[in-house]
Image: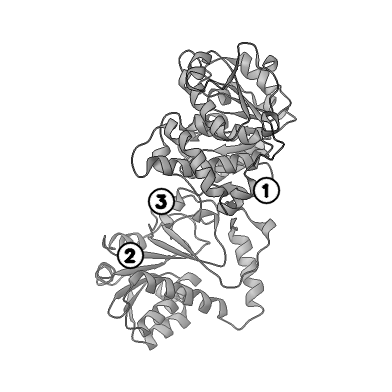
């Protein structure tokens, strides 16, 4: 897992480490790592023009010491001080000692110094910053030329380290060099889009796993969770997933949900609904039933909601089941908060931002701006696991770290893609994964399948479903 920690916990770990070593040790470690990343981005350091945007915090000191290291290698380094009286004195002295140029942000030439740089280091605001960029910082950042590289120190100035929120103008970095541990805002949109490529520099911090706020699964984590049939497996041991989806108006939702379930490894799929003919035409192996879900036969999990319309009766029958249930799309609108909270078996809700906003009674823009807060509140309010779909899909339970999915592509923003995801997650629930793991693994595979199917071009939901076995094989391969 790639673990992210709150500002409070990172600072506490820094204080513990600083108490054990000489003054300035952490800053020198951070500056050394920052200078290495800057040098790699420049390629040729000698003769390169580098500008440091320096605020009053420790990350301004990191930038100054890193700039001094680059200057010793022949770079022309200038520091633009946004708060000259509070700039780090040791860092300033180090840069001056190697011939660096010091410019006040209020000087007329400050903008030209920024515009003339090949690489700009953002050391404006540290991890404790709140709100967007203020003047003159915003004006100077706007002066960076289009072909210059921007490297953010610890995180881009103007983004919230703990939440990923961006309230106002912020630096859009090509690379963010973060120290000691990832911060949640580096992994969660909208801030993630401002961070660019994130590089972690180890400065010796010790942080406990149970202190993490956010975790991002990696290949190995997903591989360990993938259900693999044994020699004695039959369709029931592999898991039978029931699907209550589709309507006369939206039969395709049922077809795509069944596709996701079959490609996700279900031993069998039972379909209950009015789109049986469309489902059987595409997947003749599906077991169909005209009766209520409770009479359809044995299942280990249900998926309900995609394209369901206003069929509240079928949905309530599923919600009353004593097996894991995934509720999506129309099901989210029809399922009551009280009924979901009353369930004994695991429940997985899979809203997109608009559906989440309706459940929370807020504007969609509020959910999109504060995705972490929204998914946590939904999990708390419904007593369920929530998979909040979007540019960064989040999975939250009532307790524990929120999981953020690192895979995907903008091409997944296509009709029916969410139906495939629901079926895939439902098959994993039927195979025995807990709701949090099922949602996380499904989102990861779905994102990889989207990348594989699109390959940089438009794709359709059925293509995504068809790509799931390929990416499953890639992930599970040693």
Q: Residues within 10 Å of mark 3 (few under 14, many from 20)?
A: few
- Label 1: which residue? 400
Question: For the point 62% across and 27% down, which residue is it?
Answer: 268
Dot label at residue 149:
2
User: In 3D space, how far apart are the residues under numbered discs 2 and 1 (Cα atoms)?
Assistant: 37 Å
| Closer-to-camera residue (244/353) | 244
Q: Residues within 10 Å of mark 1 (few under 14, many from 20)?
A: few
Which of discs 1 and 3 lies nearer the camera? The answer is: 1
Question: For the point 64% across and 41% down, which residue is it?
Answer: 227
User: What is the secondary structure assignment of the residue under circle 1?
Assistant: loop
Dot label at residue 168:
3
Above or below — where is 421 with respect to 57?
above
Q: Are marks 2 and 1 in contact (CB under 8 Å)?
A: no
Question: For the point 54% across and 23% down, which residue is it?
Answer: 330
User: What is the secondary structure assignment of the residue under circle 3?
Assistant: loop
202 sits to left or right of 139: right
Which of discs 3 and 2 lies nearer the camera? The answer is: 2
């Amino acid at each position: 897992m790639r673990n992210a920690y709150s500002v409070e916990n990172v600072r506490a770990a820094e204080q513990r480490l600083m108490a054990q070593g000489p003054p300035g040790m952490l800053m020198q470690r951070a500056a050394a790592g920052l200078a290495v990343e800057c040098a790699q981005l420049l390629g040729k350091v000698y003769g390169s023009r580098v500008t440091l945007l320096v605020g009053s915090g420790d990350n301004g000191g990191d930038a100054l010491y890193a700039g001094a290291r680059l200057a010793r290698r022949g770079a022309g380094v200038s520091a633009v001080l946004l708060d000259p009286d509070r700039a780090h004195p040791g860092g300033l002295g180090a840069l001056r000692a190697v011939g660096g140029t010091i410019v006040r942000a209020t000087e007329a030439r400050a903008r030209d110094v920024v515009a003339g740089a090949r690489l700009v280091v953002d050391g404006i605001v540290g991890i404790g910053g709140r709100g967007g960029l203020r003047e003159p910082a915003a004006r100077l950042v706007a002066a960076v030329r289009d072909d210059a590289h921007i490297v953010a120190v610890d995180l881009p100035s103007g983004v919230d380290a703990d939440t990923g929120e961006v309230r106002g103008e912020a630096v859009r970095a090509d690379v963010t060099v973060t120290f000691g541990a990832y911060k949640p805002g580096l992994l969660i949109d909208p801030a993630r889009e401002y961070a660019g490529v994130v590089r972690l520099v180890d400065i010796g911090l010790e942080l406990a796993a149970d202190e993490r706020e956010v975790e991002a699964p990696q290949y190995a984590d997903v591989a360990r969770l993938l259900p693999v049939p044994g020699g004695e497996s039959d369709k029931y041991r592999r898991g039978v997933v029931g699907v209550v989806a589709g309507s006369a108006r939206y039969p395709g939702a049922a077809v795509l949900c069944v596709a996701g379930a079959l490609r996700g490894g279900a031993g069998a799929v039972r379909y209950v609904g009015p789109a049986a003919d469309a489902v059987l035409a595409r997947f003749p192996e599906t077991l169909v039933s005209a009766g209520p879900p409770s009479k359809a036969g044995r299942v280990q999990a249900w998926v309900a909601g995609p394209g369901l319309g206003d069929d509240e009766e079928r949905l309530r029958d599923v919600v009353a089941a004593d097996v894991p249930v995934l509720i999506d799309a129309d099901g989210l609108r029809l399922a009551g908060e009280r009924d979901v909270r009353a369930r004994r078996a695991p429940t997985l809700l899979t809203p997109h931002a608009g559906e989440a906003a309706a459940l929370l009674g807020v504007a969609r823009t509020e959910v999109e701006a504060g995705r972490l807060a929204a998914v946590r509140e939904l999990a708390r309010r419904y007593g369920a696991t929530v998979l909040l779909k979007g540019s960064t899909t989040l999975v939250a339970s009532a307790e524990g770290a929120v999981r953020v999915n690192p895979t995907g592509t903008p091409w997944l923003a296509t009709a029916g893609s969410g139906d495939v995801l629901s079926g895939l997650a439902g098959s994993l629930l039927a195979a025995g994964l807990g709701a949090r793991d099922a949602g996380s693994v499904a989102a990861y595979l779905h994102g990889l399948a989207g990348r594989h199917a699109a390959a940089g071009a438009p794709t359709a939901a059925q293509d995504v479903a068809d790509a799931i076995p390929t990416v499953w094989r890639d992930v599970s391969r040693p």
